[in-house]
Image (cartoon, rainbow, N blue to C red):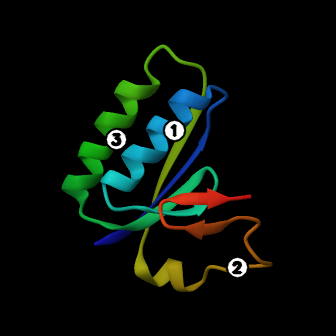
Amino acid sequence: MNYTLVIYDIPDDNLRNKISDACKRFGLEALQRSAYGGFISSGIKKELVAVLERLLKRNQGNIKIYTICKFDLKLMIDLGEPVFEKKGKEFLV
């Protein structure tokens, strides 16, 4: 399994929440407010892509989906502290 990274820029609050919920349902966890990541199978990723395509259809916004191998993931550089904290399923800003 490879790491899947989903990053999105969606102006509509309702749509943005639906995309966030979809990412969580498919096993990804929040990295930042509009970024989710996690190890999921290629089959699950295909299903996630289909759901995200349906949600974004005819709406304004952009979703980027990256596949990162374990080797490249180890090269990630993480700077600073998150500006949000997780509390259950909610985020505090």
Residue sitting at x 24%, y 63%: 41
- Give me the disc on residue 78: 2
Whole-percent x and y of residue 87?
56, 68
Q: Quadrant of residue 42?
A: bottom left
Along the horizontal axis of the image, is 16 left or right of 1?
A: right
The kind of residue on which mark 2 rests is: Asp
Dividing the image into 4 quarters, which one contains the N terminus?
A: bottom left
Q: Decide: marks 1, 3 in contact (CB < 8 A)?
A: no
Residue under label 1: 17
CA distance for labels 3 and 2:
26 Å
- Name the element at disc 1: helix
Q: Quadrant of residue 69?
A: bottom left
Residue under label 3: 49
Give the class, few, some or many, for how many residues have Cα within 10 Å of label 1's Cα (few <14, many ≥20): few
Of the numbered discs 1 and 3, the one sitting upstream in the chain is 1
Rendered view: 90 above or below 82: above
The kind of residue on which mark 3 rests is: Val
Of the numbered discs 3 and 2, the one sitting upstream in the chain is 3
Rendered view: 55 above or below 36: above
CA distance for labels 1 and 3:
16 Å
Q: Nearer the viewer, residue 39 or 66?
A: 39
The kind of residue on which mark 1 rests is: Asn
Residue sitting at x 48%, y 13%: 58
Residue sitting at x 46%, y 26%: 56
Residue sitting at x 24%, y 44%: 47
